[in-house]
Amino acid sequence: MNPVLKLLIDGGSLTTGQMAQVAGLSEAEVNQHLEQLKKDKIFLGWRPVLDLSREAAAAAAVRAVIEVKVTPERGGGFNRFAERIARFDEVESCYLMSGGYDLLVFVRGGSLQKVASFVSEKLSTIEGVLSTSTHFMLRCYKEQGFVLDSSESSASRLTVAP
Amino acid sequence: MSTDPKRWVAGHIATLPKSGIRDFFELVAKMKGQDVISLGVGEPDFVTPWHVREAAIFALERGKTYYTSNLGLLELRKEISTYVEHHFGVSYRPDDQVIVTVGVSEALDLAFRAFCNPGDKVMFHQPCYVSYHPSITLVHGEGIAVPTYAKDNFALTAEALRAAWQPGAKILMLNLPCNPTGGTCSREQLEKIADFCREKDLLVLSDEIYSELTFEGTHTSIASFPGMAERTIFLHGFSKAFAMTGWRIGYACGPAVLIDAMMKVHQYAMMCASIIAQEGALEALKNGWDNVLKMREQYHRRRDLIVRRFNEIGMKCHLPRGSFYAFPDVTPLGFTEKDFAVGLLQQQKVAVVPGTAFGVNGTGHVRACFATGYDQIIEACDRVERFVAQPRAKAG
């Protein structure tokens, strides 16, 4: 596997300079690997993982997860629906699911009303959408591998031990 | 009449030197709050995986707060037996050939107390874990240090054993992979050591606590050679590979008669290991292997990084084949191990442990634990580089 991809999968927050040291490469080589991963559409971009509940200006944002049932199209299946839905700015992630519904859509909006109007005016009005079931997220406990408000600490670890 | 309370301290304890690591610990403790990067620890930086912690919490919730049998929970001993057979190729009966202990340290203490008469000679390779020689002294045994060398990647050789051997030697203490050197033995080297043990009728105490953290080749237990399980106490535990140091949980496997002798000491001294820790260990064995592999992969990459940087900086750092310690020679930079460790701590705030804390054969070396994050390792190496680049202003 591409050594830089391996480090990205591990999910560390290494700079390209640090990646170079860990992988035993030059920084230029790390950048070349990153470029290649971008060309291959494997590496899509950087995004920070944030706990916005701690930032008053952003804390009002609302997130919801929406279960969508659609009528699959002959020839296109679910893809055309999924791609169409995924293009909305409000949509953070969109997955085709097995089970009782077809698409699972993660949405973020500036307020509850904005998310509600997105669902009622944009999502549910797409031809072929049979139903939506919207669940608003109340509180986040773990975000992309980071446990929020974790009281875990290594501060009590001895600095020198046998 | 003397009123000095020291008069009550047993003679062999009064003359027992304190661990060399203790002085250094106190030096580092004085620098609390000063952004010290510690490469001086002897434990994983990973917290015990959650599923193990959760299993222990669940055990408490179910009211598991009582003593277990002296040998430990039978279910845990069964899992240990299966694990050891699968990973080390040696078969032990859970009923009478496995004992669960409070860390490998207790298992080792039990073994010395059970097998070592006053005056018995115990061979051990050095540099070595700080407690080996004192543990022999505590039972009035006589330690025979067998040197290992950087030129051999700190592998123990049968030749060195033979050169150090003395008539009356009864026990050989092994620790492969080794703390602090990371040294291991190849299968061929170990086979020669096994031959030597049979020839000299030695009982082997084999501390294999770092065995899962073997990066070069595969780990071989000396107990797996023909005729060796009968003369070997296999010592292992959960602290390193399963990141469970604070749980204090280990075990010993061996011939039933020998485990029974250890159990006699254990039942009077300790009764049993904590049931909560035993429940956690059980979960670790049942479902923890994936986490062991993930952690090992991280250690492996960190090892490659720190060894490369140390050599670039001008230290002579052999490749530790196992464990999570680098043990570079700092003498090419013009330092003694103590000057280097003290100077680096005081000037650049990086803690490493002088090699002499692990015996006289650690002279010229320092131990640097790479069980810490990449960013910390990189920053520590940058600081080491700055330290050695200064005009030779040694610590004073």
Image (cartoon, coloured by chain):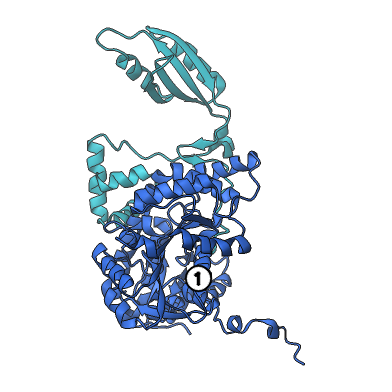
Chain colours: A cyan, B blue
The image quadrant of residue B59 is top right
Examine the rendered structure and indicate whether residue A56 appears above or below residue B85.
above
Q: Nearer the viewer, residue B282 or B324?
A: B282
Q: Nearer the viewer, residue B266 or B239?
A: B266
Examine the rendered structure and indicate whether residue B281 appears above or below residue A58.
below
Q: Residue furthest front?
A: B257
Q: Residues within 10 Å of mark 1 (few under 14, many from 20)?
A: many
Residue at point 44%, 51% (across, down): B93
Answer left or right for B357 relative to B197.
Answer: right
Answer left or right for B378 relative to B187.
Answer: right
Number of numbered labels in the structure image:
1
The image quadrant of residue B178 is bottom left
Q: Nearer the viewer, residue A112 or B294?
A: B294
The image quadrant of residue A43 is top left
Residue B237 visible? The answer is yes
Residue B230 in the image: x percent, y percent? 38, 62
Examine the rendered structure and indicate whether residue A141 appears above or below residue B273.
above
* Chain holding disc 1: B
Secondary structure, mark 1, is helix
Residue at point 34%, 60% (across, down): B221
Q: Quickly name the residue at label 1.
A: B112
